[in-house]
Image: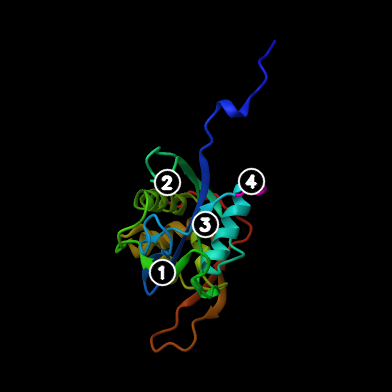
Protein backbone atom coordinates (compact mmCIF):
# COMPACT_ATOMS: atom_id res chain seq x y z
CA UNK A 1 0.00 0.00 0.00
CA UNK A 2 1.36 3.39 -0.99
CA UNK A 3 2.21 5.65 1.91
CA UNK A 4 -0.09 8.64 2.29
CA UNK A 5 1.49 11.91 1.29
CA UNK A 6 2.35 14.18 4.22
CA UNK A 7 3.23 17.74 3.11
CA UNK A 8 4.71 18.48 6.54
CA UNK A 9 7.60 16.13 5.75
CA UNK A 10 8.90 18.39 3.00
CA UNK A 11 10.42 21.84 2.95
CA UNK A 12 8.48 24.50 1.05
CA UNK A 13 10.63 26.76 -1.09
CA UNK A 14 9.08 30.05 -2.12
CA UNK A 15 8.33 30.72 -5.79
CA UNK A 16 8.74 34.05 -7.57
CA UNK A 17 8.38 35.32 -11.13
CA UNK A 18 10.73 37.71 -12.92
CA UNK A 19 9.71 39.55 -16.08
CA UNK A 20 12.28 40.67 -18.66
CA UNK A 21 11.03 43.22 -21.17
CA UNK A 22 13.31 44.15 -24.06
CA UNK A 23 12.74 47.09 -26.38
CA UNK A 24 14.65 49.21 -28.88
CA UNK A 25 15.02 52.89 -28.05
CA UNK A 26 17.37 55.44 -29.56
CA UNK A 27 19.16 52.82 -31.60
CA UNK A 28 19.93 50.62 -28.58
CA UNK A 29 18.58 47.40 -27.07
CA UNK A 30 17.16 48.22 -23.65
CA UNK A 31 15.68 46.26 -20.75
CA UNK A 32 13.15 47.43 -18.16
CA UNK A 33 14.42 47.57 -14.56
CA UNK A 34 12.98 48.70 -11.23
CA UNK A 35 14.71 50.21 -8.20
CA UNK A 36 13.90 48.21 -5.09
CA UNK A 37 12.38 49.98 -2.08
CA UNK A 38 12.69 46.99 0.27
CA UNK A 39 15.45 44.85 1.69
CA UNK A 40 17.28 42.84 0.61
CA UNK A 41 19.14 44.91 -1.98
CA UNK A 42 17.21 48.08 -1.19
CA UNK A 43 17.98 50.91 -3.65
CA UNK A 44 19.47 48.48 -6.16
CA UNK A 45 18.10 47.90 -9.63
CA UNK A 46 16.40 44.61 -10.42
CA UNK A 47 14.17 42.82 -12.89
CA UNK A 48 10.47 43.44 -12.16
CA UNK A 49 8.86 40.54 -10.31
CA UNK A 50 7.72 39.12 -7.02
CA UNK A 51 6.23 36.20 -5.10
CA UNK A 52 3.54 33.94 -6.54
CA UNK A 53 0.31 33.80 -4.54
CA UNK A 54 -1.21 30.43 -3.72
CA UNK A 55 -4.36 31.05 -5.76
CA UNK A 56 -2.75 32.30 -8.98
CA UNK A 57 -0.92 30.69 -11.88
CA UNK A 58 2.65 31.62 -12.75
CA UNK A 59 1.55 33.69 -15.74
CA UNK A 60 -1.10 35.48 -13.67
CA UNK A 61 1.54 36.33 -11.08
CA UNK A 62 3.90 37.63 -13.76
CA UNK A 63 1.29 39.92 -15.28
CA UNK A 64 0.15 41.16 -11.86
CA UNK A 65 3.67 41.96 -10.67
CA UNK A 66 4.51 43.70 -13.94
CA UNK A 67 1.42 45.88 -13.70
CA UNK A 68 1.86 46.65 -10.00
CA UNK A 69 5.52 47.61 -10.24
CA UNK A 70 5.75 49.28 -13.65
CA UNK A 71 2.20 50.01 -14.91
CA UNK A 72 2.88 47.83 -17.97
CA UNK A 73 0.03 45.57 -19.11
CA UNK A 74 -1.33 43.66 -22.09
CA UNK A 75 2.02 42.09 -22.95
CA UNK A 76 2.38 38.58 -24.38
CA UNK A 77 4.90 36.86 -22.10
CA UNK A 78 6.90 33.78 -23.02
CA UNK A 79 8.31 31.58 -20.27
CA UNK A 80 12.09 31.78 -20.39
CA UNK A 81 13.74 29.58 -17.76
CA UNK A 82 13.62 28.50 -14.11
CA UNK A 83 16.48 29.62 -11.86
CA UNK A 84 16.93 27.68 -8.63
CA UNK A 85 20.36 28.22 -7.11
CA UNK A 86 19.80 27.60 -3.36
CA UNK A 87 21.82 30.74 -2.51
CA UNK A 88 20.20 33.13 -5.02
CA UNK A 89 18.08 34.90 -2.35
CA UNK A 90 19.49 35.70 1.13
CA UNK A 91 16.04 35.52 2.76
CA UNK A 92 15.12 31.91 2.09
CA UNK A 93 15.14 29.23 -0.60
CA UNK A 94 13.49 30.93 -3.61
CA UNK A 95 12.92 29.40 -7.04
CA UNK A 96 12.10 31.94 -9.75
CA UNK A 97 10.37 31.36 -13.06
CA UNK A 98 11.34 34.01 -15.59
CA UNK A 99 9.32 35.37 -18.50
CA UNK A 100 10.41 37.63 -21.33
CA UNK A 101 9.10 39.62 -24.26
CA UNK A 102 10.21 42.01 -26.99
CA UNK A 103 7.91 45.04 -26.91
CA UNK A 104 7.35 48.50 -28.34
CA UNK A 105 8.07 50.85 -25.44
CA UNK A 106 6.01 53.66 -27.00
CA UNK A 107 2.86 51.82 -25.94
CA UNK A 108 3.60 52.13 -22.22
CA UNK A 109 3.54 54.90 -19.65
CA UNK A 110 5.87 53.71 -16.89
CA UNK A 111 4.96 54.28 -13.26
CA UNK A 112 6.71 52.88 -10.17
CA UNK A 113 4.50 51.65 -7.32
CA UNK A 114 4.13 49.02 -4.54
CA UNK A 115 7.62 47.97 -3.41
CA UNK A 116 9.69 49.84 -6.03
CA UNK A 117 10.68 53.51 -6.09
CA UNK A 118 11.66 53.93 -9.75
CA UNK A 119 11.34 52.22 -13.11
CA UNK A 120 13.24 52.91 -16.32
CA UNK A 121 14.83 51.47 -19.43
CA UNK A 122 18.56 50.60 -19.37
CA UNK A 123 20.87 49.64 -22.21
CA UNK A 124 21.50 45.91 -21.98
CA UNK A 125 25.16 46.76 -22.63
CA UNK A 126 25.45 49.33 -19.81
CA UNK A 127 23.65 47.85 -16.82
CA UNK A 128 23.94 49.03 -13.21
CA UNK A 129 24.88 46.55 -10.50
CA UNK A 130 21.84 44.30 -10.13
CA UNK A 131 20.15 42.59 -7.18
CA UNK A 132 20.05 38.83 -6.64
CA UNK A 133 21.26 36.81 -9.66
CA UNK A 134 19.57 39.15 -12.12
CA UNK A 135 22.77 39.75 -14.09
CA UNK A 136 22.89 36.03 -14.91
CA UNK A 137 19.20 36.00 -15.78
CA UNK A 138 19.58 38.91 -18.21
CA UNK A 139 22.61 37.32 -19.87
CA UNK A 140 20.57 34.18 -20.51
CA UNK A 141 17.56 36.22 -21.68
CA UNK A 142 19.69 38.10 -24.21
CA UNK A 143 21.05 34.83 -25.54
CA UNK A 144 17.53 33.45 -25.95
CA UNK A 145 16.31 36.63 -27.64
CA UNK A 146 19.08 36.35 -30.22
CA UNK A 147 18.20 32.70 -30.81
CA UNK A 148 14.57 33.68 -31.40
CA UNK A 149 15.67 36.29 -33.88
CA UNK A 150 17.38 33.58 -35.92
CA UNK A 151 14.32 31.35 -36.36
CA UNK A 152 11.21 33.47 -35.76
CA UNK A 153 9.64 36.70 -36.99
CA UNK A 154 9.72 38.32 -33.51
CA UNK A 155 11.51 41.41 -34.93
CA UNK A 156 8.29 42.48 -36.66
CA UNK A 157 6.73 43.22 -33.26
CA UNK A 158 8.87 46.38 -33.15
CA UNK A 159 7.92 47.65 -36.59
CA UNK A 160 4.93 49.65 -37.84
CA UNK A 161 2.58 47.96 -40.29
CA UNK A 162 4.62 49.36 -43.19
CA UNK A 163 8.39 49.65 -42.97
CA UNK A 164 11.57 49.84 -45.01
CA UNK A 165 14.04 46.99 -45.35
CA UNK A 166 16.63 49.25 -43.73
CA UNK A 167 14.41 49.60 -40.65
CA UNK A 168 14.04 45.82 -40.49
CA UNK A 169 17.78 45.25 -40.85
CA UNK A 170 18.51 47.86 -38.17
CA UNK A 171 16.47 45.91 -35.61
CA UNK A 172 18.44 42.75 -36.35
CA UNK A 173 21.75 44.61 -36.09
CA UNK A 174 20.85 46.22 -32.76
CA UNK A 175 19.75 42.96 -31.15
CA UNK A 176 22.50 40.81 -32.67
CA UNK A 177 25.00 43.59 -31.82
CA UNK A 178 26.78 43.33 -35.16
CA UNK A 179 26.60 44.73 -38.67
CA UNK A 180 24.95 42.70 -41.41
CA UNK A 181 25.72 42.85 -45.10
CA UNK A 182 22.93 44.88 -46.71
CA UNK A 183 22.80 42.93 -49.97
CA UNK A 184 22.86 39.50 -48.33
CA UNK A 185 20.26 40.49 -45.74
CA UNK A 186 17.79 41.71 -48.36
CA UNK A 187 18.39 38.70 -50.54
CA UNK A 188 17.70 36.37 -47.61
CA UNK A 189 14.55 38.23 -46.49
CA UNK A 190 13.06 38.23 -49.98
CA UNK A 191 13.97 34.60 -50.61
CA UNK A 192 12.17 33.57 -47.42
CA UNK A 193 9.08 35.49 -48.56
CA UNK A 194 8.59 36.98 -45.08
CA UNK A 195 7.87 40.47 -46.44
CA UNK A 196 5.59 41.77 -49.15
CA UNK A 197 6.35 44.79 -51.28
CA UNK A 198 3.76 47.58 -51.28
CA UNK A 199 3.20 50.38 -53.79
CA UNK A 200 4.00 52.97 -51.12
CA UNK A 201 7.17 54.91 -50.36
CA UNK A 202 8.51 56.81 -47.37
CA UNK A 203 7.19 60.32 -46.88
CA UNK A 204 8.62 63.38 -45.14
CA UNK A 205 12.25 62.41 -45.73
CA UNK A 206 15.04 64.59 -47.11
CA UNK A 207 16.70 61.74 -49.00
CA UNK A 208 15.33 59.59 -51.79
CA UNK A 209 12.26 57.84 -50.31
CA UNK A 210 12.59 54.09 -49.85
CA UNK A 211 9.96 51.54 -50.80
CA UNK A 212 7.72 50.32 -47.98
CA UNK A 213 7.09 46.68 -47.16
CA UNK A 214 4.78 44.77 -44.85
CA UNK A 215 4.98 41.41 -43.12
CA UNK A 216 3.69 38.49 -45.14
CA UNK A 217 0.81 37.29 -42.96
CA UNK A 218 0.67 33.95 -44.78
CA UNK A 219 3.90 32.73 -43.23
CA UNK A 220 4.10 31.23 -39.76
CA UNK A 221 6.05 32.48 -36.77
CA UNK A 222 8.82 29.90 -37.22
CA UNK A 223 11.20 30.90 -40.02
CA UNK A 224 14.90 30.09 -40.21
CA UNK A 225 16.25 33.56 -40.99
CA UNK A 226 19.92 32.98 -40.19
Residues at marks 4 and 1, CA–CA distance in whole angstroms: 31 Å
Callout 4–callout 2 Cβ contact below 8 Å:
no
The mark found on residue 63 in the picture is: none
Residues at marks 3 and 2, CA–CA distance in whole angstroms: 40 Å
**Earlier sequence position, callout 3 versus callout 2:** 2
Q: Is residue 74 above or below residue 51?
A: below
Q: Position of residue 1 (x, y in %)?
A: 70, 10
Q: Is residue 83 above or below residue 162?
A: above
Residue holding disc 2:
91
Identify the residue at the far top of this view. Answer: 1
202 left or right, relative to 138 = right
Label 4 packing within 10 angstroms: few (<14), some (14-19), many (20+): few
Q: Nearer the viewer, mark 1 or mark 3?
A: 1
Q: Secondary structure at mark 3?
A: loop
**Earlier sequence position, callout 1 versus callout 3:** 1
Residues at marks 1 and 3, CA–CA distance in whole angstroms: 24 Å
Which quadrant of the structure image shows residue 86? Answer: top left
**Earlier sequence position, callout 4 versus callout 1:** 4
Residue holding disc 4:
54
Q: Position of residue 2 (x, y in %)?
A: 67, 14
The mark found on residue 121 in the picture is: 1
Q: Which residues are magenta?
A: 53-57
What residue is at 57 percent from the left and 53 percent from the top? Answer: 221
Callout 2–callout 1 Cβ contact below 8 Å:
no
Label 2 packing within 10 angstroms: few (<14), some (14-19), many (20+): few
Q: Secondary structure at mark 2?
A: loop
What residue is at 45 percent from the left and 40 percent from the top? Answer: 93
Residue holding disc 3:
153
Could you tell me how many numbered marks the image carries? 4
Label 1 packing within 10 angstroms: few (<14), some (14-19), many (20+): some
Residue 11, visible in the rendered structure: yes
Amino acid sequence: MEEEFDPEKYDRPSVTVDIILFTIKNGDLKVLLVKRDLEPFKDMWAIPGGFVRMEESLEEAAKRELLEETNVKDVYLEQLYTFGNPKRDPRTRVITVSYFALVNSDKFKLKASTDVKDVKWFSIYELPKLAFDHQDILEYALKRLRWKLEYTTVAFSLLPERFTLTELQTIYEIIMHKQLDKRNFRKKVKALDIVKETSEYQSDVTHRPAKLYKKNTKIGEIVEIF
